[in-house]
Image (cartoon, grey):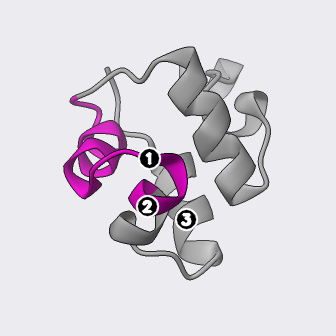
Amino acid sequence: MSKNLKMKSSRAAKDMSQKDLADATGVTRQTINAIEKGDYNPSIKLCIAICKALDKTLDQLFWKDDEDA
């Protein structure tokens, strides 16, 4: 699993800390950190919550582009 730099940069662009995003999505800061580091594969429900909090789509944050493969 690769790092989720799209999620990290989207979070930073909204000036949100990992704790802010965790609070907005109902998980711990450690969970957000693990997702960004690529150590944890979130459920689709959590992916959707993260997308809503960051005003992004699933495609923008979680699906691999051809150049990412």
Contact check, label 2 and label 3, Cβ < 8 Å: no
Type of the residue with mark 3:
Arg
- Report which quarter residue 15 is drawn in: bottom right
In the image, residue 49 lies at what x, y percent? 62, 39
| Disc 1 secondary structure class | loop
Residue beneath label 1, please?
A: 26
Residue beneath label 3, please?
A: 11
Residue 61: assigned label: none
Q: CA distance from mark 2 to mark 1?
A: 5 Å
> Viewer-nearest of labels 2 and 3?
2
Residue 22 falls left or right of residue 59? left
Structural crowding at the residue carrying mark 3, measured as other residues with C-alpha within 10 Å and reported as few (<14), some (14–19) or many (≥20):
some
Contact check, label 2 and label 1, Cβ < 8 Å: yes
Of callouts 3 and 1, the N-terminal one: 3
- Residue at 51% in and 75% down: 16
Provide the residue span drawn in magenta. 22-39
> Viewer-nearest of labels 3 and 1?
1
On screen, residue 16 above or below 69: below
Of callouts 2 and 3, the N-terminal one: 3
Image quarter where the N terminus lies is top left
Is any atom of residue 68 visible in this view?
Answer: no
Structural crowding at the residue carrying mark 2, measured as other residues with C-alpha within 10 Å and reported as few (<14), some (14–19) or many (≥20):
few
Residue beneath label 2, please?
A: 23
Residue 23 on the magenta span: yes
Q: Main secondary structure of the magenta part?
A: helix
In the image, residue 32 lies at what x, y percent? 34, 48
